[in-house]
Image (cartoon, grey):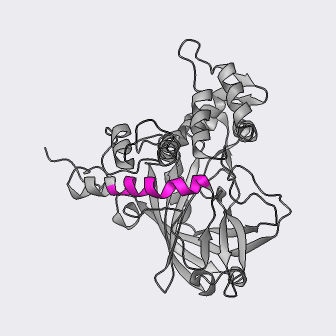
Amino acid sequence: MKIGDIDLKRSWPALAGIGAIIAVLAAAFAWTSGLLGQRVTNMTFLEDTQHDFPAGYRRAHGKGMCFEGVFRSSGEAAKYSHASVFAQPETRAIGRFSIGSMSPYAADNSTSTVSMAMMLTADNGQQWRMKMNNEPYFPTRDAPGFLEMMKATAPDPSTGNPNPQQLAAFLAEYPEARKYMEADAVKPWASSFAGATYYAIHAYYLLAEDGRRQAMRWWLRPHAAFTAWSDEERAGASHDALFKEVGQRLTKAPLQWDIVMQLAAPGDPVDDPSQPWPETRQQVVAGTLEVQRVFDQTDGVCRDVNFDPTLIPAGMALSNDPVLATRAGIYAHSYNSRLHEIGYGKATDAVGKKTAQ
């Protein structure tokens, strides 16, 4: 079914891939804003919605692979921020590649969303944690809007197609979502993690020693060329095609991405993740990430890291982006839930062990 230039049938897998966690975020936002009729704790909400989730796994992007590497600073961002990660030559990087499906058992061709999470730890112990997808901006200006989009684009059980009236009503309330839906309908499916661009989408502030504040957004620009699956290649791809491919690449050479920061100009919408800034804005290459090896996510080195994008070093500050603001509590509860499951021996699969017979 198409609405204008939007192919909803094609877009739905990508939307569904990130929908589950955004639904949680939206509900948490509504709760903290007093919009829900019954005030429950975030923990109660998570238990009610995810009681049957496989023990020990992340509640979103459950299928992943850890990586280790190094971030090499260019020194250019040190002009704008006194964070140590921009001043020292090299910083250890721990991260994770994942796909957009909630299930840890999903096939790699089930979603067009590929993701990277990363934690940089400077010599002074301060950390910069980040979570990025191959989406340059968020669909809506807030988390509840994404939940409304999921409802508006969901197939009606009686027809198998979305309800045109519901979609029209949604776009009237959230007109910014149209550009995302139109772009997503034609977005190519990455055939490799290596050539994908990963976007942080939220704005942050760089803080200089002299007190200057500079709003910026960043993304990871790959050195490898982007390659896309054709429809036939995607249909025939193996269950773990993306993860096997990145492992094979790393037997030949490390993989690299530049961290590119786009600097806001006065008047740019800093607190709205659905509004990209003009391409003419100044860009700074803060340095280069080199991924050197990957390994199974059952290893605790990345398995037990909470990649909460609100955890940033001195020299950076959060914006008032409402989507960013909802994430910290939900990430913490998801993190605590899976560590509780691991600690009490309920997550044998997630830690690479077999259940006793």
Say above or below: 81 vs 41.
below
Image-quadrant location for residue 170: top right
Residue beneath the point at 53% across and 16% down: 157
Say above or below: 3 vs 129.
above
Residue beneath the point at 69% across and 39% down: 184
Residue 126 location in percent, x, y? 49, 79
Say above or below: 184 vs 67.
above
Magenta run includes residue 118 = no
Say above or below: 127 vs 228.
below
Residue lying at the far left of the rendered structure: 357
- Is residue 260 shown to the viewer in this render? yes
How many numbered markers are drawn? 0
> What residue span does the magenta drawing correspond to?
322-336
* In front of the other: 59 or 292: 59
Residue beneath the point at 56% across and 61% down: 249
Residue beneath the point at 74% across and 25% down: 3
Residue 4 location in percent, x, y? 79, 26
Magenta run includes residue 330 = yes
Main secondary structure found in the magenta portion: helix
Image-quadrant location for residue 193: bottom right
